[in-house]
Image (cartoon, coloured by chain):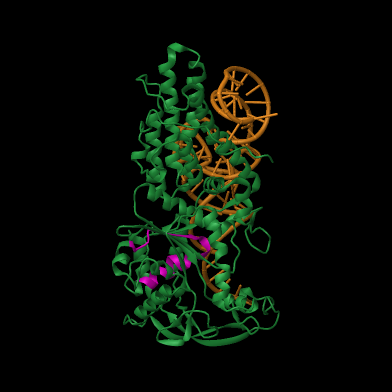
Chain colours: A green, B orange
RNA sequence: GGCGGGGUAGCUCAGUGGCAGAGCAAGCGGCUCAUAAUCGCUGUGUCGCGGGUUCGAAUCCCGCCCCCGCUACCA
């Protein structure tokens, strides 16, 4: 556990890429979890950022006639603007080109280098090299034994590199997974990791001399750190490693590293081993979600399936965007995106479900009580609603702590369904016509409004904007951001006399 | 080749020994507070294929087919 702080991270993104809905999927899920823990009253540290070193960036910069730093400075804002638009409330944003990061990387490397076990050693990297690409290829990447890009023969090359002795850590890793059954999730990914580690681990190279855009090794600056000791280290840099020991002790280890399944091995094997080599605790949990597919294809730039989040946010709005990806795709599994399914979800769950529920309740409060939440006479008209709220709130909490995001949101939706059903059963519009049933009417509308209040609280982590608008329509004076579960989800906290206003529909139907 | 996951309604999926389920979509009825909304009812299935165990199998066993992931090796 993070000692005192719930610490959750996203991967750091590569600024050469154009953000697409696959990248945003990590970010939304992570933000949902982070916001939920804040709702529970926990201190939360949510980290994201960009991975700004490496040969590809150096090349792209050269092609653009810029220095690598100028280049990443120009690209990185494209990512932040997406996070801003998606209401991603990170607490810190790390760029691997920052000096705080360089210091942490050097410290980690030096610590491992000096750990007395010879865990970093000078070795020889051998591979098939394309002189035009200045890159090594593996055999299966080649086309007819030639470079897949230039079509020229590759050369067997050797290069002196430093290596990390990953092979020495297989047993310790296995003991770690054994002692922490949730260290790698979901289960299918844990199995994969176990089978890879049991199959034996190979040392990996951690430095290059063939390019310069990176962090030099402290004991041999002719070498530039290659990828993993740079990228993964961001998670401890931002926690205060090497700069703020007190803070580091409070924040580390991370509770959750949220990643895509493509970087599972690095996070679930390399990273814990690297930390062990420096006598730092491994992260509590690595959570590898699935991939989004579009038309049955894995999303990519090359087949034009790389949909930019704005294409969808412009049409559906940010809250529907966040809701859709969490609700429609079983979290942990691969799932297919389609405009049609998003449109269906939008109308069924948001416009007709939650949105319409809010409209009808607020409209009746308006016409029968001038918008003021009525006093609750002791008529018991709320029926089973309080019990259901209690049950849902408790299940929601358990599911969220278990990162079962899809069923968690589905559980909250049981309240939407039950509330719509409840209104038809109690028919407040009929009670309103009968002067002798004013008390019953008050009881029903109070209960309906109370459900809306609780929905706003429970849904604020997944759709903060819409929850906020609903909260405003309810007219509650305390800020939504100050609410904490479970107390805020207790029945009966909506104060009679609160002035509600119907306002605009939460999720207007979309013509298409 | 090995390991793992999966194949259930038109779609997305739940269901690990006891009459095949949910949501969405579709059809019919009710209601009129609400965003052409909502509520109720309704149909649909060789539960991948073939065997077996069992009083009883989507569920357990054996064999096979197909899809996905990880991994190995041949070459």
Residue A2, placed above or below residue A481: below
Q: Is residue A279 left or right of residue B32?
A: left
In this rendered view, identify the residue nearer to me: A425 or A333.
A425
**The C terminus of chain A, quarter of image:** top right
Left or right: residue A412 compared with residue A133: left
Q: Pick whichever, A396 or A476, lies toward us.
A: A476
Q: Is residue A427 visible?
A: no
Q: Out of A171 and A368, give the one closest to the viewer.
A: A368
Q: Can residue A48 be seen in this view?
A: yes
- Residue under the image location 37 percent in, 31 percent down: A495
Q: Which region shows up in magenta?
A: A251-275
- Eyeballing the image, is A262 above or below A489? below
Q: Residue at x 58, y 37 (%)?
A: A351
Q: Does A241 sit left or right of B69 as displayed?
A: left
Q: Is residue B69 above or below residue B38?
A: below
The percent coordinates of residue A264 (x first, y second) are 48, 64
The majority secondary structure of the magenta stretch comes to: helix
Residue farthest right in this picture? A151
Residue A85 in the image: x percent, y percent? 55, 54
Asked if the magenta segment contains residue A273, the reply would be yes
Q: Position of residue A383 (x, y in %)?
A: 40, 24
């Amino acid at each position: 556990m993070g000692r005192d702080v719930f610490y959750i991270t996203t991967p750091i993104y590569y600024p050469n890429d154009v953000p697409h809905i696959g990248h945003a999927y990590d970010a939304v899920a992570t933000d949902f979890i982070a916001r939920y823990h804040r709702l529970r009253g926990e201190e939360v540290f949510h980290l994201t950022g960009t991975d700004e070193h490496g040969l590809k960036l150096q090349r792209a910069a050269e092609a653009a006639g810029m220095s690598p730093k100028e280049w990443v400075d120009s690209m990185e804002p494209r990512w932040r603007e997406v996070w801003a638009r998606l209401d991603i409330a990170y607490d810190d944003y790390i760029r691997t080109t920052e000096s705080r990061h360089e210091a942490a990387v050097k410290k980690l490397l030096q610590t491992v280098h000096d750990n007395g076990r010879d865990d970093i050693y000078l070795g020889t990297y051998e591979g098939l090299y394309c002189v035009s690409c200045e890159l090594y290829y593996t055999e299966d990447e080649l086309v007819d034994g030639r470079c897949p890009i230039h079509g020229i023969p590759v050369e067997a090359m050797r290069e002196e590199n430093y290596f990390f002795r990953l092979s020495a850590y297989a047993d310790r890793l296995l003991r770690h997974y054994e002692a922490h059954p949730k260290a790698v999730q979901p289960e299918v990914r844990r199995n994969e990791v176990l089978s890879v580690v049991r199959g034996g681990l190979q040392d990996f190279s951690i430095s290059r001399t063939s390019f310069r855009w990176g962090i030099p090794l402290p004991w041999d600056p002719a070498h530039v750190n290659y990828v993993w000791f740079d990228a993964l280290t961001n998670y401890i840099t931002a926690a205060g490693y090497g700069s703020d020991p007190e803070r580091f002790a409070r924040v580390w280890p991370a509770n959750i590293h949220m990643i895509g399944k493509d970087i599972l091995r690095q996070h679930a094997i390399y990273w814990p081993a690297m930390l062990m080599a420096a006598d730092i605790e491994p992260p509590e949990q690595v959570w590898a979600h699935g991939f989004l597919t579009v038309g049955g294809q894995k999303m990519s730039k090359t087949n034009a399936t790389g949909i930019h989040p704005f294409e969808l946010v412009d049409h559906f709005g940010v809250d529907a965007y966040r809701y859709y990806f969490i609700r429609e795709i079983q979290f942990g599994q691969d799932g297919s995106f389609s405009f049609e399914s998003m449109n269906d979800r939008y109308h069924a769950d948001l416009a007709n479900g939650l949105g319409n529920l809010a409209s009808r309740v607020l409209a009746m409060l308006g016409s029968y009580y001038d918008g003021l939440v009525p006093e609750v006479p002791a008529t018991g008209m709320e029926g089973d609603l309080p019990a259901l709220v209690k049950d849902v709130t408790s299940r929601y909490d358990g599911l969220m702590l278990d990162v079962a995001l899809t069923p968690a949101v589905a559980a909250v939706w049981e309240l939407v369904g039950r509330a719509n059903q409840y209104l038809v059963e109690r028919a407040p519009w009929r009670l309103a016509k009968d002067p002798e049933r004013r008390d019953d009417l008050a009881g029903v509308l109070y209960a309906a409004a109370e459900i809306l209040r609780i929905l706003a609280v429970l849904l604020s982590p997944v759709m903060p904007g819409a929850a906020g608008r609903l909260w405003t329509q309810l007219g509650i004076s305390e800020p939504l951001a100050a609410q904490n579960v479970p107390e805020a989800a207790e029945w009966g906290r909506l104060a009679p006399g609160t002035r509600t206003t119907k306002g605009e529909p939460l999720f207007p139907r979309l013509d298409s």
